[in-house]
Image: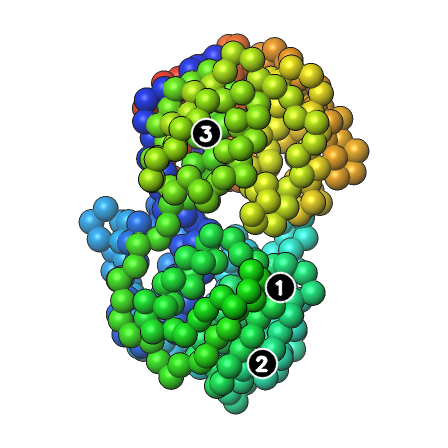
Amino acid sequence: MEKFVIKGPCRVKGAVSVSGSKNAALPILASTILFDKTVEIKNLPRVKDIETMINLLRSLGSKISFSKNKRAVKINNSKIKKTFASYNLVKTMRAGILVLGPLISKYGSATVSMPGGCQIGVRPINYHLSGLKKLKMNYEIKRGYVYANAKRIVGSVIKFPKISVGATENLIMASTLASGKTILKNCAIEPEIKDLINFLKTGGAKIKWIGKRTLEIYGVKSLDSTIYSVMGDRIEAGTFCIASALTQGDLNVNGLNPKIINTEINLLKKIGAKIKTKKNQIIIKGSKKIKNLSLITTKEYPGFATDLQAQFMVLLCKAKGRSVIQENIFENRYSHCAELRRLGASIIVKSKKAIIYGGADFEGAELMSSDLRASVALVLAAIASKGKSIIHRIYHLSRGYENLDKKLKKIGVNIKKIR
């Protein structure tokens, strides 16, 4: 099994370009089911979750061809013959459930495996199912699968009881080819959702925002061929910004509109980082003195991103004074704390809160990854540690970070991948 060996401390400097967004590309790929004609998707990240979604589409009958660099793909779904998404594909990727909405809308039938368990917490699909039911989908759950059918998906007014990214995406896709008008209230407004909407609109979908969290969708009969480039990955950009702030770095992070991570940029400024922004560039210099933060709380967008919580905690371990993080999105997202303690961190977890006592003098150790974002947090901590760290189970990172070791090596990190 592959692992990282990192010798620190390292100072990051130079320039790094972020890859396309995994969390935007996955629903966009699922939504290609709605198209009869060929679509081309550019700026795909070369990560495991994208490979899994491509394999899922192929299992349904999609005809897919990659460009030479594997970052663009042409997809033709005119001959989909299957509407069955097997457990073997869906079990490794929560986003597999996103084919339910487009399949039921386009073909009136779908059998989709229930998503498996997740290290960071329970993410049920009840909001997906209750919303689709209001669009006239019938379903039953048997032997771990959702068996769904509909004579015709019909527009309705739906208010999500709680903000849900996945449910918002599934209902947007299902409503695109529905009969009549759909109003979706209390929608998630993550940039990745807006990227999905922009993609569908290039194919002729009639979708518009009529309030901060309210969408109006008029169903169309079909979607036209289109070419679309996926947005940059805001979580990857944020991770590199944190790496610079952590190591007194001097880094140019390219490929993302800085406004998308404005909340996180403001927090980095508060802890002492010097930041300048341009159209698609963030220039960040770390400070010798990292300031503590009395309380930061993860929230739905545009709040502080839960996917950057673990990385930010590493930074606060080096701050002067006591900081508190409150995790409000996932109930099991502090698995990295025990591993950070192995490096010398002082962290106490009490329910939703993690209390971080700063001033940690990290020393290298062997570490075990538990999930995608916890894994990259351990990489950051190893970069800021004295001596050698070995990080096991780095396969988690392949789900969401493209060529992480190569990008880090390019900006000054002593890192190598071994078996």
Taking the view exactly as shown, the residue that stands out farthest to the front is 211
| Residue carrying label 1 | 186
Q: Residue at x 54, y 20 (%)?
A: 272
What numbered label is drawn on residue 241?
A: 3
Residue sitting nearer the eye, 23 or 64: 23
Q: Work out whether mark 2 precedes mark 1 in sequence or the reverse, and give the earlier one.
A: 2
Q: Is 205 on the left-hand or right-hand side of 101? A: left
Q: CA distance from mark 2 to mark 3?
A: 42 Å
Q: CA distance from mark 2 to mark 1?
A: 14 Å
Q: Residue at x 39, y 33 (%)?
A: 277
Residue sitting nearer the eye, 137 or 59: 137
The answer to which quarter of the image holds residue 24 is bottom left
Q: Is 283 on the left-hand or right-hand side of 370? A: left
Give how far across and how far down residue 402 sits, in percent: 38, 39
Give how far across and how far down residue 326 sits, in percent: 71, 37
Q: Amino acid at mark 1?
A: Asn
Residue 342 in sight here: no
Q: Amino acid at mark 3?
A: Cys
Q: Work out whether mark 1 precedes mark 3 in sequence or the reverse, and give the earlier one.
A: 1
| Residue carrying label 2 | 156
Taking the view exactly as shown, the residue that stands out farthest to the bottom is 151
Q: Is 222 on the left-hand or right-hand side of 292? A: left
Q: Are marks 2 and 3 in contact (CB under 8 Å)?
A: no
Q: Are marks 2 and 1 in contact (CB under 8 Å)?
A: no
Give how far across and how far down residue 123 sits, in percent: 64, 55
Instruction: Decide: is 275 above or below 42.
Output: above
The answer to which quarter of the image holds residue 281 is top left
Q: Residue at x 46, y 22 (%)?
A: 274
